[in-house]
Image: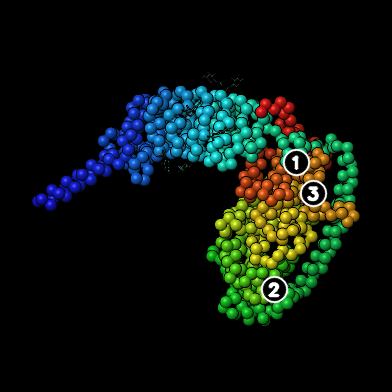
Amino acid sequence: MEGLCTILLISLVSLALTQGNAVLDDGDKQALLDFVNSFPHSRDLNWDVNSAVCKNWTGVTCSQDESRVIFLRLPGVGFHGRIPANTLSRLTALQILSLRSNGITGPFPSDLYDLKNLTYLYLQFNKFSGPLPANFSVWKNLTIVNLSNNGFNGSIPQDISNLTLLSALNLANNSLSGVIPDLHLPSLQQLNLSNNNLTGILPKSLKKFPKSVFSGNSISLPFSPIPGPPGVLSFHQPNSKPKNAGRLSESALLGIIIAGCVLGVIGLAFLLLVWCLRRRGEDGFAGNLEKGGMSPEKAISRSQDASNRLVFFEGCSYAFDLEDLLRASAEVLGKGTFGMAYKAILEDGTSVVVKRLKEVSVGKREFEQQMEVVGGIKHENVVELRAYYYSKDEKLTVYDYYSQGSVAAMLHGKRGEDRIPLSWETRLKIAIGAARGIARIHAENGGKLVHGNIKSSNIFLNPQQYGCISDIGLSTIMGPLPPPLARASGYRAPEVTDTRKTSQPSDTYSFGVLLLELLTAKSPVHTTGGDEVIHLVRWVHSVVREEWTAEVFDLELMRYPNIEEEMVEMLQIAMACVVRTPDQRPKMVEVVKMIENVRQTEAYNQPSSEAKSESSTPPAPPQVFETETSIPQ
Ligand SMILES: *[C@@H]1O[C@H](CO)[C@@H](O)[C@H](O)[C@H]1NC(C)=O
Ligand SMILES: *[C@@H]1O[C@H](CO)[C@@H](O)[C@H](O)[C@H]1NC(C)=O
Ligand SMILES: *[C@@H]1O[C@H](CO)[C@@H](O)[C@H](O)[C@H]1NC(C)=O
Ligand SMILES: *[C@@H]1O[C@H](CO)[C@@H](O)[C@H](O)[C@H]1NC(C)=O
Ligand SMILES: *[C@@H]1O[C@H](CO)[C@@H](O)[C@H](O)[C@H]1NC(C)=O
Ligand SMILES: *[C@@H]1O[C@H](CO)[C@@H](O)[C@H](O)[C@H]1NC(C)=O
Ligand SMILES: *[C@@H]1O[C@H](CO)[C@@H](O)[C@H](O)[C@H]1NC(C)=O
Ligand SMILES: *[C@@H]1O[C@H](CO)[C@@H](O)[C@H](O)[C@H]1NC(C)=O
Ligand SMILES: *[C@@H]1O[C@H](CO)[C@@H](O)[C@H](O)[C@H]1NC(C)=O
Ligand SMILES: *[C@@H]1O[C@H](CO)[C@@H](O)[C@H](O)[C@H]1NC(C)=O
C-alpha cells in the first residue's frame, strides 16, 4: 500500500515537472504571454498558461534543454496593430522570428534590437511602414531577412553591409527610395529589391544578380566592363563598323583560308589514319595495345593475375573484363595530353572510351586512391569513370562513350550545310553544365581535387544537352605535365607554364578559355596570317580593348536575336576567369552563379528564319548599354 502511494506521488511530481514550466526560463514564458495578451489577433492560439510552453504552444520552439525560446513562428495568426513594446525584446535567445502574413502596422519593431542571436527574420506581407533599421549590425548572425511586401520607405541602410553572414535579403514590394548602397555581402545568394522606388546606378557588387530582382525601380544597370573604362564593351552593329573594319575582315578571311588549308591537311591525315585503322580493325584493341609496345598475349596473361583486374565502380552496369576489352574492335579517338584515347566496341555492341595513360608517376596504391575519388563522383555534369586498370606496364581508364562527340568537334568540326550549328542556347547549357561539373569536382577530396585538363575536347553533352566534363583528376597522378600539345597550350594558365602544376585557379583559367571558345568558335591557339600564332585570350583582350567587342563573337551566333547582352555578360565572365593573377580568378562555384544569372527572363533565342548573319540588322541595343552620366553615389 505504502509502495503504491510512493509511486503515485512520484509520477504526480514528475507530471507536474514536465507539464509545468519548471525548466523554461520564466521570463520567456511571461514575455510570450505579455506579447500575445496585448497584441490583438483573430485566430486563437492554444497558449494555455497551464500547458507546457515548449511542448504544447503553437509556434514556439525551445532550445534543446528547454531553457529558452529560440524559434517563434506565428504566420497568419491575424495579428493587427503594432507589436507591443517590451515583449519580444525579452526573448533574448530568439534565433528565428516569423510574423509573416499578418496585418501588423507601425514602424520596424525596436524590440528586435535586443535579439542579438536573431538569424532568420520573416516579416513579409504585413503593413509595416517607416524606415528600415539604421543599425542592422546589431544582429551579427542575421542570415535571412525577408521584409518584402510591406510599406517600408526611406533608403536602404549602408549598415546592411556589416551583415557578413547575410545570405538572403528580400525587400521587394516596399516603398524604398534612394540609391542602392554598395553592399559588399560575401555570403549573399538571394536578393530581391523589385517594386520599390529605388534610383541611381546599380552598384558593381550586386551585378551578379539577375535583372528581375531590380525590376519595378528606376535603376540604371551600368555596363562597366572588366578591362578598360565604362563603355568599352559596347556592342557594335555589323553595319556601323568602325574605321578599320575592312582590315580585320581581310585578315579574318586570310585566317579562314589558312585554317581551311590546315583543316584540309588534318582531314587528309585523319582519312589516312581511319584507313589504317580499318586495315588493322580485326586486330581490335589488343592490336592497338600491341602497337604501343605490349603484345595481346602478354596483356591477357596479365589479366589473369588476380591483382590486375579491371576495377569497376559501383552502379556500373557493364559486364566485361580485360579480355573482352582486348577483343573489342577499337578505333583511335585521338591523342590526348596523357595518352591515346580509343573507342572500343564490345561484343555486345556497347561502346566505351578507353584511355591509355602514359607516364603515370604514382604507385598502384596512390593510383587506386585517386581513381576511387574520381570514380566516386556521381554528377550529371561529370562523365563517370566506369572502370580502371593498373598494372606495371599498362594503366587504363574506361568511360562512357558519347556518340555526339566532344564540344571541340561540334565547335571546330567542318562547317558545312549538313552541320547543325551550335545554338546560343546549347552553348549556354554547355557552359553552365561544364561549370557545375567542375565546381563539383573542386568540392571533392576535401575541396582539393583539381581537374587539370579542361578543354573542349574533354566536354561532352549529357542527355539533357548540358555540358558534362571528362578526364578528371589525371593531372595529379601523372608526372610533370608534358609540354602541351599545340592546341591544348591555349588552355594553360600562365603560371602553369612555369610551375607545370595545375590548381583550382588554373582550372578556372582553362574554363575561361573554354567560354571564349564557345563565344568565338575559335581555337585557343590558332594561326592567322603567316607563322603568326594567335592565343585566343590575348586576341580577345586586344579586340575588346579596341572597342570591337562585337567582332569577337562567332558569326554563327548572329542569327539569334536579342542575345547580345547575354553574350557580353558571358564574355565578361570569361575575362574574369582568365585574369593573370591566380587568386583574382573567381572560384568555380561563383562562376556557376554568374553564368546562371546570364540567362534573361525575356523570350529570346528563336532563330528567325529571315535573319541572315551578314545582312540582318541586330535589334536596338537593350537599355543596359546606355551609359548613365549622372552617377549619384
Ligand atoms: C497539450 O496539453 C494537453 C493538456 O493541456 C495535453 O493533453 C496534450 O497531450 C498536450 N499536447 C502535446 C502535443 O503535448
Ligand atoms: C546565442 O546563441 C549562442 C549559441 O547558440 C548561445 O551560447 C548564447 O547564449 C546565445 N545568446 C543569448 C543572449 O541567448
Ligand atoms: C540602434 O540600435 C540600438 C540597440 O543597439 C537601438 O536601441 C537603437 O534604437 C537603434 N537606433 C536606430 C536609429 O535604429
Ligand atoms: C552568433 O554568432 C556568435 C559569433 O558571432 C556565435 O558565438 C553564436 O554561437 C551565434 N549564435 C547562433 C545562435 O548561431
Ligand atoms: C520572402 O517572401 C516572399 C513572399 O512571401 C517569398 O516569395 C520569398 O521566397 C521569401 N524570401 C526568402 C528569402 O525567404
Ligand atoms: C515615409 O512615410 C511616412 C509616412 O508613412 C512619411 O511621413 C515619411 O516622410 C516617409 N519617409 C520618406 C523618406 O519618404
Ligand atoms: C558597420 O559598417 C559601417 C560602415 O558601413 C561602419 O562605420 C561601422 O563601424 C560598422 N559597425 C559595426 C558594428 O561593425
Ligand atoms: C510583389 O507584389 C506583387 C503583387 O502584389 C506579387 O505578385 C509579387 O509576387 C510580389 N513580389 C514579391 C517578391 O513578393
Ligand atoms: C516614388 O517616388 C516618386 C518621386 O520621388 C513619388 O512621386 C512616388 O509616389 C513614389 N512611389 C512610391 C510607390 O513610393
Ligand atoms: C523578385 O520579385 C519579382 C516580383 O516582385 C519577381 O518577378 C522576381 O522573379 C523575383 N526574383 C527573385 C530572384 O526572386
Number of the front mark, 1 or 2? 1
Label 2: how many Cα within 10 Å (few below 14, some 14–19, many 20+): many
Q: Is residue 348 visible?
A: no
Residue 227 is labelled as 1
Residue tagged by mark 3?
A: 538
Residue tagged by mark 2?
A: 285
Q: Going from the N terminus, do you reach mark 3 or mark 1 first?
A: 1
Q: Are marks 2 and 3 in contact (CB under 8 Å)?
A: no
Secondary element under disc 1, as helix, strand or loop, is: loop
Q: Is mark 1 within 8 Å of ligand 10?
A: no
Secondary element under disc 3, as helix, strand or loop, is: helix
The residue at 39%/25% (across/down) is: 84
The residue at 78%/46% (across/down) is: 540
Number of the front mark, 2 or 3? 3
The residue at 83%/58% (across/down) is: 263
Measure the alpha-carbon separation of dots 3 and 1: 12 Å
- Snapshot quadrant of residue 607: top right
Inspect the image, locate mark 1, and give the three-letter code of the amino acid beneath it.
Pro
The location of residue 260, given as percent across then percent down, is: 85, 56
Q: Is residue 105 left or right of residue 367?
A: left
Q: Is residue 288 visible?
A: yes
Measure the alpha-carbon separation of dots 2 and 3: 41 Å
Q: Is residue 263 left or right of residue 12?
A: right
The location of residue 98, given as percent across then percent down, is: 44, 35
The residue at 33%/27% (across/down) is: 37
The location of residue 562, given as percent across then percent down, is: 72, 38
Inspect the image, locate mark 3, and give the three-letter code of the amino acid beneath it.
Arg
